[in-house]
Each structure stands twice: as structure tokens, then as C-alpha cells.
Image (cartoon, rainbow, N blue to C red):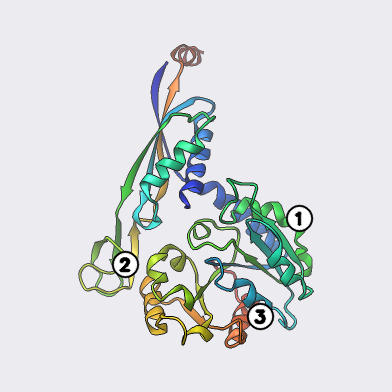
Amino acid sequence: MHELSIAQAIVDVATRHAEGRRVLRVEVQVGHLRQVVPDSLQFAFALVVQGTALDGAELAITHVPAAGRCRECGAESMMESFPLSCGACGSFDVEVLAGEELLVEGLELEEDLLENSRVSST
Amino acid sequence: MHRIKVRVVEEVLDANNTIARANRQDFDRAGVRVVNLMSAPGAGKTALLERALADTGDVRVGVLEGDVEGSLDADRLASLHIPVVQLNTANGFGGECHLDANMVRSSLAAIPLAEIDLLIIENVGNLVCPAEFRVGEDARAMVCSVAEGDDKPLKYPLMFRACELAVINKIDLLDHVDADLDKLLANLQTVHPGIEHLLTSARTGEGVDGFRDWLVSRVRSPATA
């Protein structure tokens, strides 16, 4: 259910960076630990883009697996599910290194070539 | 027309976090410590506050009450004769399921910050979204009732990891529900090693003193988070 709020926040970030241009594609990184359901995020995104500069834009989601460093044995390992534990010794005392990302990484925008060349010639 | 690529790399919730920091500065300036209190619907947040805030000694407490609709909880707390401000989220997408920093910011003018030392923000009942949105708080606490089952920490790790205190409420029901308290506490430590917990029953009053002490001690402890 938090996908709707997250989709809205993604649209806000993209709209600001697009500066009035049409957005064709939004690339986001979503960490495993954020518990975002990709299908729900796609569905919510398709709803909230309606009537905005992102209408019809594609949402490309990159899933970032969770990784951690054990505070007991020092090993670094991937953590696939809760409870988070060290892959080497099984300790639950792990520092999260990756998996908490929630980032807009990049955009693809539609840009008017003529307008662009005018700008660059001045 | 052609396609151009733009590299952004921005936290999706950056805008919320920026407003949360502004809220925090306003709270700090007024010398008010803030606790964001979260739980699933019906875990007993309001009932606990009714008991715990009845006598907080010389610490002056106010409550910002977040609900999708209505003022039922705020009305209950108003009988304690403390400042209570209702914040309804029904204007969002058919009722936002959480408070965000901007909603709290819009309520700041209504909160008598000069007259309180501690503000408790009772978030909308929900174990998912409120964990994502900082609102400018110093500390985050959650209530989990034994009636919800002993597996709750494993099912909603994001929330249990976001809080520094878990209040295990409705312990008077332990004989009547299948939840195993030891298992619940073990699951809690598994998901969030080192998290503080309290056992309470808002119904009988058992353990509520401990919750009151924890809240009041926020005022005396140095700022964190």
C-alpha cells in the first residue's frame, strides 16, 4: 500500500528535474529492504502519472538485493529474506550495506531539437 | 523531437526528508521533543496515551492526532485537558494512510509549541507507510498488541526496524490468544537487535508507568535521530 505514496514521490522528483519537458522513462533503484512490490508500484505509477508530464512514461525498476556485513565475524554476504542474518556465521547482528535504496536514478526526456540548437547557439 | 537521458540520482523521499528537517528545527527552537507513535489500527495507541498522559508531572505534553477521518481519538484525549490537535488525511488519495512531513508542517501553527515540552504525534494506524515518512520527530515508537500474533515483527520488518521502542500491549489477553510472548520478543530481537521493549496493558494499566517514564525521559535526553 505504500507504493502509491512512493509512486507520487517518484513523479514529484521526475517532474522537478524535467523542467517542463515530457518524461518518457523513469529509472528507479529499489532496495530489497524497502518491501516495495514491483507490480503494485507499476500500477500506482500508471495511476498517478495521468495528466502530468509523465503521462504514458515507462517506469524501469532495478531491484537492489540486500547485503550486509556481520559485526561478529566480519563477513560480507547477501541477505535474501528476514530475519537478516550473516551468510557465514548466522549472526543476526549485521550492518546493512545495501538494500535500503529508494532512488530516482535517471530520466529520459523528450526534447525539441530546434529549441535545443537555439539555446546552444546563443 | 528526440530523446535525451538525464542522470538524476535523488532519494525518492528527499522532499519529505527536507520538510521533516525543517519541522525538526522548529521543534528544537521551541524546545519541544517529538515522538512519532505508530502501530497497526486497533493496537491501542490512544488507550495507552489516555492512561499514560493522565499524569506526566511537570512535563507538559501535547498530542497531534493523525487519522484518515473524524476526531474520535482526539475527543478521547481532550478529556485529559492537554492540547490536542486533530490532523485528518482524507484529502489525499481517498485518505492517506500515513502522516508525512508536509501534513505535520501544515499543522504546526495549530500546535501551541510554547506551552508544551513533549509532542506526541499519533500516526495513522498502519504498519507499512508510516515507517517510510519522517515527520521531524526525535524518536519513533510503536505499539504491537499480542492479539496481532507473535509473527508480526517478521511480517512488517520495515516498521519494527524503524522504531527504537516497541510497546507490547494487551498483555492481559495473553491467556486468550494464541500468541506466544517469548516467541514475539525473540522475533522482535531478530528483526531489530537491541530494540527496547515494554510490556503493557492499557486496559488494566499494567506497565503503563514504564511507557509514561519512557515518554517523559525523551524530554531530558539529548536529541537523537
Secondary structure under the numbered disc 1 in the rendered image: helix
**Count of numbered marks:** 3
> Residue A99: x and y, percent?
35, 56
Q: Nearer the viewer, residue B109 or B200?
A: B200
Circle 3 residue = B52
CB within 8 Å, label 1 to label 3: no
Report which residue position mark 1 lands on: B109
Mark 2: few/some/many CA within 10 Å (<14, 14-19, 20+): many
Query: Residue at horizontal 59%, vertical 58%?
Result: B135
What residue sits right under mark 2 in the picture?
A84
Q: Report in which chain the residue with disc 1 lies.
A: B
Q: Identify the residue at the far front of this view.
A: B176
- Callout 2 amino acid: Leu
Left or right relative to B5: residue B223: right
Picture quadrant of residue B214:
bottom right
**Amino acid at pointer 1:** Ala
Mark toward the start of the polypeptide (1 vs 3):
3
Q: Nearer the viewer, mark 3 or mark 2?
A: 3
Measured Cα–Cα span from mark 1 to mark 3: 26 Å
The reply to whether callout 1 and callout 2 are in contact (CB within 8 Å) is no
Residue B126 screen position, x and y as percent: 52, 62
Residue A112 position in % (x across, y down): 46, 16
Above or below residue A104? Residue B177 is below
Secondary element at tag 3: helix
Badge 1 and badge 3 both on one subunit: yes
